[in-house]
Amino acid sequence: GGSKAASLHWTGERAVSVLLLGLLPAAYLCPGPAVDYSLAAALTLHGHWGLGQVITDYVHGEMPIRVANTGLYILSALTFAGLCHFNYHDVGICKAVAMLWSL
């Protein structure tokens, strides 16, 4: 059971990484809401899993792990909500990065 779940998680991490590799050129070549929201989801998930590994590696003890994981879920939810808000109410991720590059 645990080995199968770990294998699926590893496969999911690789799939999101490959998706991000495809979304980066897509953001440049055809920016728009679909790419903006896909980036918001993929970047949030990628960061969530990465910070989850930091917690696994460096946080020890039942209560500290529980607190750290709760904080991680809150941070990830706020990150996704913030990126979606930025996409909907402002220029969006693709346009914002293009504006930064034009400086």
Image (cartoon, rainbow, N blue to C red):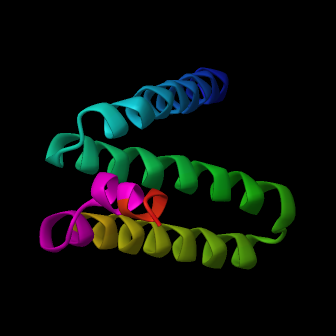
Is 46 placed above or below 56 here? above
The number of numbered badges drawn on the structure is: 0
Nearer the observer, 48 or 30: 30
Kindly identify the residue that appears in the image at 81 percent across and 68 percent down: 59
Residue 47 placement (x, y as % from top left): 56, 54
**Which residue appears farthest toward the front when viewing the image?**
103
Give the image quarter of residue 66: bottom right
Residue 69 placement (x, y as % from top left): 59, 68
Kindly identify the residue that appears in the image at 29 percent across and 70 percent down: 81
Nearer the observer, 46 or 63: 46
Membership of 38 in magenta stretch:
no
Is 19 placed above or below 40 here? above
Task: Identify the magenta region.
Answer: 85-98
Is 6 placed above or below 62 here? above
Q: Report whether 95 appears left or right of 73.
A: left
Kindly identify the residue that appears in the image at 18 percent across and 45 percent down: 32
Q: Report whether 78 appears left or right of 58.
A: left
Membership of 94 in magenta stretch:
yes
Give the image quarter of residue 100: bottom left
Q: Name the image quarter holding the N terminus.
A: top right
Kindly identify the residue that appears in the image at 25 percent across and 70 percent down: 86
User: Could you tell me what secondary structure mostly forms the magenta stretch?
Assistant: helix
Residue 24 placement (x, y as % from top left): 44, 36
Nearer the observer, 71 or 36: 36
Nearer the observer, 91 or 23: 91
Residue 15 placement (x, y as % from top left): 49, 24
Q: Report whether 92 appears left or right of 15.
A: left
Q: Report whether 85 appears left or right of 15.
A: left
